[in-house]
Amino acid sequence: MSDTEVNNKGKQKTMGQPANVTEFESLKTDNGNTDTSGHENRYQKTVLENGIRVVTASMPGVRSVSMGVLINAGPRDESPEECGLAHLIEHAMFQSTSSKNATQIASIMDTAGGQMGAFTARDYTCYTATVLDDYRTYALELLSDLLLNSIYPEENMEREKGVIMREIDASNDLPSKKVHSILKESIWADHALGRPIFGWPETVKPLTREDVIYFVHKHYLPNRMIVSAAGNLEHSDFVAQVRDFFWSLMGESIPTDNGPPSYTAGVTIEHASVSQAYFSLGIRAFPYAHPDRYGFHLLNAILGGGISSRLYRRMREERGLVYEISSQYHAYEDDGVLVIEGSTKPEYLMQVLGLTLVELWRLITLDEPADEEELWKAKMQIRGQHIISGEITSTRMSQLATQEQYFGRYIPAEEIIGEIDAVDNRMLERMARESLIKFLKQTAIAIVGPKAPEYYSVSSIEDLLKSFQ
């Protein structure tokens, strides 16, 4: 599972695909050529007069259209005292506009047989809709109405804050989610990346309607908006409609400068009334657009990216120490982390952590480098994930948006596949020498489990980490 974003239904979702999929954007080629999945695609981009970027991919043969408005604003633009404000805004957008109430908003989408939603990520906020092509205009008009004309009724704001409180409670009740949150709070303690997207109860409760309006007016501006769409559409027609619906939005806004994140290693344990010990181990990784990101994605796939990965095979299949264990590469605008997560019996925790660190060090330091079969299989796995995801309009739409967000350009399939295929052990050796060994010395571990000092403690885990320095 990738790093998660919080959506307005109080659930978890990812933008399109897990991080090791969306990073490679989508297997699309420009100007109506055929991509590696065998589908016709046409990518086009237009910048409107007010600065909004419109990116589309036409997908002949489908009847649906997915569209989204990605806004380069979110938790990074909050002060620590406002933690959770961007997520509250995402909820509040669906309550009422100057011409529609919440029931009417929902009714429009139900009538269209479509889906509308939103989610808040650590780097941005996104509002999306998927409908039959016949209802494209209605969906786009509704998205623009929400973003430009929401009125945020006071009574609805209080109700939505209550909903978010239940969301926080539900997340804290799940040790697998709690340990993940603890890890990021510990490694990025003094940065927006470390704060929970949905906030803390003590920061959400005081938020006001005025806070919401000020944030939207300050940050939801054209130069920070990307409108993306994929499916049965023509670029020129879609651009004309975006212009019609968003022409009145004017102004510019500069994203908040939080400074570079500082990464803190260490051990954090939170005791809970559970039978298993849940662990989340993180080492620093490359940010989203780093030139060596392809190599890191392949290392992740080999280490813990599937049921034939080293961690799963050696920890579960060969030793039976865990029920599940996996690794994920979470990449952001200015930092990243490789996260290894799982759970085990408290008496096995130290053994599992030790073996996990061994596997991590062997792979990254090339004591046991990826062999040709492992590297080939990892490349095929990533390639296959892209081909499958490329057949879904919502995934293509989100990939278009994140490409534009992080790279400012379209990346054709040939370039992506070429970069993946170019990764070999010589490149991985260079990455290890230049960065990865240093990253290994910045390992952080979070634990949520029963109080069992006879099996594990902060000091015993710290001693374990020291033995790998």
Image (cartoon, rainbow, N blue to C red):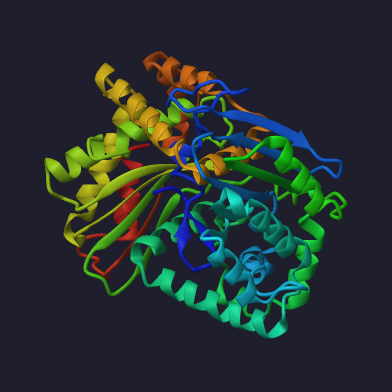
Residue, x 24% and y 51% (percent of image)?
324
Residue 3 in the image: above or below residue 149: above
Count of marks placed on residues: 0
Answer with left or right where residue 257 lies relative to residue 169: right
x and y, in percent, of residue 146 in the image? 71, 64
**Is residue 405 in sight in this rendering?**
yes
**Is residue 442 in sight in this rendering?**
no
Front-most of residues 403 and 206: 403
Answer with left or right where residue 289 lies relative to residue 215: left
Front-most of residues 19 and 105: 105
Residue, x 47% and y 48% (percent of image)?
265
x and y, in percent, of residue 174 in the image? 36, 68
x and y, in percent, of residue 202 in the image? 60, 77
Residue at far bottom of view:
155
Front-most of residues 28 and 433: 28
Residue at far front of view:
134
Residue, x 21% and y 61% (percent of image)?
346
Please tell me in which quadrant of the rendered image residue 54 appears.
top right
Q: Quadrant of the C terminus?
A: top left
x and y, in percent, of residue 80 in the image? 66, 64
Please tell me in which quadrant of the rendered image residue 240 appears.
top right
